[in-house]
Amino acid sequence: MKLDLEGRRLVIAHNPHSSRSRAVQQSVFDRLDSAGLVYELIEVRQASLADNVARLKSQIHDGDIILSAAGDGSAHAVAHSVIAAAKKGVELGFLAYGNFNDLPHAFNSSATLRDPVAFLEAARSEKVYALDILVDDKLLRHALLYATFGWTAQAAAIFGDPKLRGKLTQGGAGLGKSLSRLGVYYFQSRRSSLLPNFSLNGITHNAATDLILANGPAVARVFRTGSRYYRKSKEFRYTVLDVRKLFRNAPFLLGGLVGRMPTDETSEIKLDFGAPADLPIQCDGEVVKLRGVRSIVVRKDPKPLNILTTKN
């Protein structure tokens, strides 16, 4: 195996309520058992990010190899727990057992998406610089791949609805089904999705529905950025959109789907609102609804994560 497990713990983080949780036993635990690999489990619960981090960070030790075998929400919680634990030599990898699986697809080849043994045989570690999202001068979240503010964040929130989540969990889910549900939501909600007026690095925006920040090779596995900006210690990309006007966004849609979406490079984003504002934001698909916000700053975290990858 390329990864040296000698003297290190192999830890599997799983969520029994994730959409593909039934497959984890057979495809992850049984494969590891058959390969004779010893591992420990930590459980991500259906709880707030803060609650999960508070409980999980004490379960992370120096030198751990941690594999998240669940959806992006659980992977998001595990990544935050690793950051909060601040232990030496921890390496984190992602297996695809959710709906969108943004994080596994960003770092894995197709052959290692769901096979932990193949993943451990092929994986290497690379440094990943996450985005830090600061709200009114306080750190709110980290985002490894992307963050969005506005309609796209609100749309992501529909997948947290208990009824929809139950259907996805019972029947299985994938990108096709999820995008179909998202299309229905778009035509129901796009006309009432304006963001509060804001200035972005001093430029005023009065008719925007979305701010998209890209740090990885794709946003929500659909829109391509063309670069793995998480490898950069300072730069990332951004764009402002008005999704109410479908045809006007054709260059963005086509570019993102077949080439790379048009964005600008920056090392910091600062949003200022003229009055306390309410808006949804999402980081790697996980949604937070903000109330009474006056400013938001986004920049790179100076301390990188050691992420396991099977891509070049």
Image: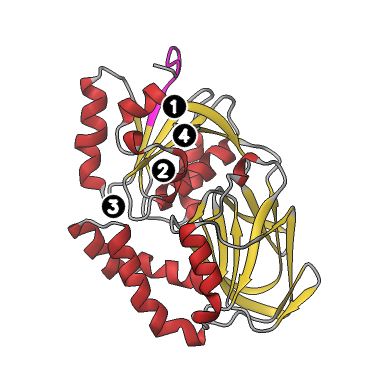
Quarter of image, res 169: bottom left
Which residue does the numbered mark 1 point to in the structure image?
123
Instruction: Give the mark, 2 or 4, whose residue is nearer the N terminus.
Output: 2
**Residue flagged by tag 2: what amino acid is it?**
Pro
Residue drawn 49% across the image and 66% down it:
254
Marks 4/1: CA–CA distance: 8 Å
**Residue flagged by tag 1: what amino acid is it?**
Ala
Which residue does the numbered mark 4 point to in the structure image?
311
Kind of element beneath mark 3: loop
Characterize the local packing of mark 1: few (<14), some (14-19) or many (20 or more) Cα atoms within 10 angstroms: many
- Is the Cβ of the residue at disc 2 closer than 8 Å to that at disc 4? no
In the picture, the disc for residue 36 is: none
Q: Which residues are magenta?
A: 3-11
Residue drawn 31% across the image and 20% down it:
38
For the residues carrying marks 2 and 4, which lies nearer the camera in this image? 4
For the residues carrying marks 1 and 3, which lies nearer the camera in this image? 1
Of residues 146 and 294, which is closer to you in this image? Answer: 146
| Residue 122 visible in the displayed image | yes
Residue 280 sits inside the magenta stretch: no
**Residue flagged by tag 4: what amino acid is it?**
Lys
Which residue does the numbered mark 3 point to in the structure image?
17
- Is the Cβ of the residue at disc 4 closer than 8 Å to that at disc 3? no
**Image spot of residue 149 (x, y percent):** 58, 68
Q: Give the overall secondary structure of the magenta segment.
A: loop
- Is the Cβ of the residue at disc 1 closer than 8 Å to that at disc 2? no
Kind of element beneath mark 4: loop
Which residue does the numbered mark 2 point to in the structure image?
104
Above or below 52: residue 180: below
| Residue 223 visible in the displayed image | no
Instruction: Give the mark, 3 or 2, whose residue is nearer the N terminus.
Output: 3
Kind of element beneath mark 2: helix
Instruction: Give the mark, 1 or 2, whose residue is nearer the N terminus.
Output: 2
